[in-house]
Amino acid sequence: MSTIALAKDMDRDTAVAGGGDTGTRRYARLPRPDLTFTDEVREATAPVYEKVKHLIPEIEWPLLAPVIHAINTLKVERNAVILAHNYMTPEIFHGVSDIVGDSLALAKEAAKSEADVIIQCGVHFMAETAKILNPEKTVLIPDMNAGCSLAESITAADVRGLREKHPGVPIVTYVNTSADVKAECDICCTSANAVQVVESLNAPRVLLIPDQFLAANVARQTDVEILTWAGACEVHERFTADELREYRDIVPGVKIVAHPECPPEVVDEADFTGSTTGMIDWVKEHRPEKVMLVTECSMADNIASATPGVDYVRPCNLCPHMKRITLTKILDSLLEMKDEVTVDPAVAARARTSVERMINLKS
């Protein structure tokens, strides 16, 4: 770590962030950088603007570019890595991220890095998962209020209640849950591997929580009886089959790619269903002339530059929680080393077991 990022003594100019098993680290609170749009900034950020120029008007770039440049400079001084979920806005996704992807992929990749600090550009459960898999690193989230309707639909006490109601039935939890919930479950799953995880338990009946629509879509692909919880993602649950049929009428020939957190009737209308990574891979492989991604609308913005020639029809359901993360808040996180995400070590150990059981499954 750079010497500028360390402070020997705690005073009014020092920020404190925990270091997991290594104890508390102290970081100097750095001075706010000059955010003038200079020729140096223009040149340094030109490759980024090339990727986002179809999305961000040129008149707005002088306001964004200095912040992007400052963040990219500060993360080197802090020995920090920035994780950006696929739903981040383009200036974050293309401008300052080091690793992009879905929540679990981000945490796993961060574990391979030599960074001391992880900045999680996503929602709170993602930062918790990053901390669970990287206990020795300092994990920060630019806005502590970036929550998730799905993760907040169930608690650890609810899981304990399910165990009492269904004794002996294994419990699979979607990674889109809190550390407390993961700690109470037997194994985690993603939207991409949920069927594999369910079937790996060799049980006639399995609880798959908390997303009722993911569970319903999994149930149609396995002979295992699936029990679930009435949770849902506020972005994906709003899509309807009628809406998709209307788009097909308006945009003839459009290919529709849906996320499995959507209701089953929406999935039935889609040409392909998969996780965010699966959706991206499908578009890159098939290169449809016109495509509609039935998920959070920033994802289409983020992959458009990697798929030239594909016309994206954008049904815009924004995630208000993801959109709490902004460039300015990322900059403040790096300057002040806030806000730190911690997980009780006992909870983290049990949650890590659930996550690692999934990771260690043979394909």
Image (cartoon, helix red, strand yellow):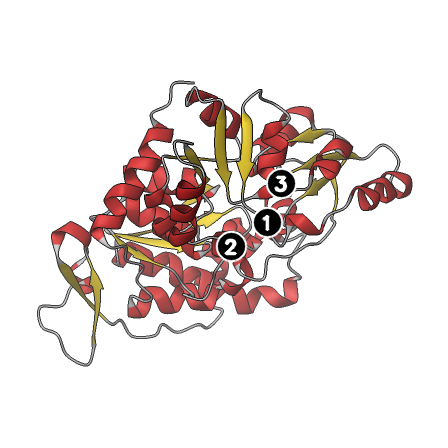
Seen from the viewer's position, the closer of residues 281 and 346 is 346
Residue 205 numbered mark, or none: none
Q: Determine the residue positioned at 61% across, 46% down.
A: 299
Q: Earlier in the sequence, mark 1 or mark 2?
A: 2
Q: Which residue is mark 3?
A: 213
Residue furthest right in the image: 249
Left or right: 156 in relation to 199: left
Q: Which residue is mark 1?
A: 232
Q: Determine the residue positioned at 59% across, 57% down.
A: 319
Q: Determine the residue positioned at 79% across, 41% down.
A: 241
Residue 309 seen = no
Q: Secondary structure at mark 1?
A: loop
Marks 1 and 2: CB-CB under 8 Å?
Answer: yes
State how far apart marks 3 and 1 are (Cα).
7 Å
Q: Which residue is mark 2?
A: 153
Q: Position of residue 332 (x, y in %)?
A: 37, 69
Q: Secondary structure at mark 3?
A: helix
Marks 3 and 1: CB-CB under 8 Å?
Answer: yes
Q: Amino acid at mark 3?
A: Phe
Residue 168 vertical position relative to residue 49 in the rendered view, above or below: above
